[in-house]
Image: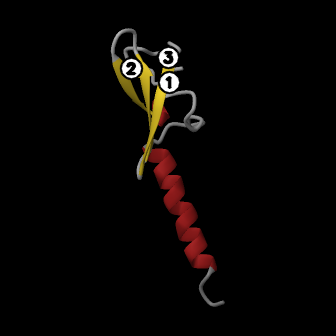
Amino acid sequence: MVTHPFHPLFGQRLEVLCVCRFATGRVYVCDGGGRNVALDERATDRGPEPADRPLTLEVLVGLVAVVAALRGSGEGS
């Protein structure tokens, strides 16, 4: 199923014709109703689950704080 919200085939189930593996991940070549469509795995229900929270400035600031705390805890060991 196409799960990427901005894809024109969003919500549709397509027949997978073949799977191509690349260093960056898998691409599914599907029957898109008379033409083949290549879908990155992340745009399908076969990809990883979406994040619980969007990547925002606040999330990044929190990540920086965690990394800084981890670096600080390793000093003096």
- Label pair 1/3, CB-CB below 8 angstroms: yes
The amino acid marked with disc number 3 is Leu
Q: Earlier in the sequence, mark 1 or mark 2?
A: 2
Determine whether, in the image, residue 73 is placed left or right of residue 42: right
**How many neighbours does mark 3 have within 10 angstroms: few (below 14), some (14-19), or many (20 or more)?**
some
Closest to the observer, 47 or 37: 37
Render colour scheme: secondary structure
Q: Is residue 73 visible?
A: yes
Can you tell which mark lies on residue 14?
3
Residue at position x 45%, y 24% in the image: 4
- Residue at the spot of label 2: 7
Give, as a three-letter code, the residue at label 1. Answer: Val
Label 2 CA crowd tier, 10 Å (few <14, some 14–19, many 20+): few
Q: Nearer the viewer, mark 1 or mark 2?
A: 1
Quadrant containing the C terminus in the rendered view? bottom right
Label 1 to label 3: alpha-carbon separation: 6 Å
Q: Give me the C-alpha separation between circle 2 and circle 3.
A: 13 Å
Label 3 SS: loop
Taking the spot 41% from the left edge, 49% from the top edge, the residue there is: 24
Tell me where residue 40 sits by quadrant: top left
Taking the view exactly as shown, the residue that stands out farthest to the left is: 35
**Amino acid type, label 2:** His
Rendered location of residue 9, percent (x, y): 42, 14
Q: Which residue was labeled with disc 1? A: 16
* Secondary structure of the residue carrying numbered label 1: strand
The correct choice, above or below, for 51 with respect to 68 in the image is above
Q: Residue 76 placed where, x, y %?
A: 62, 90
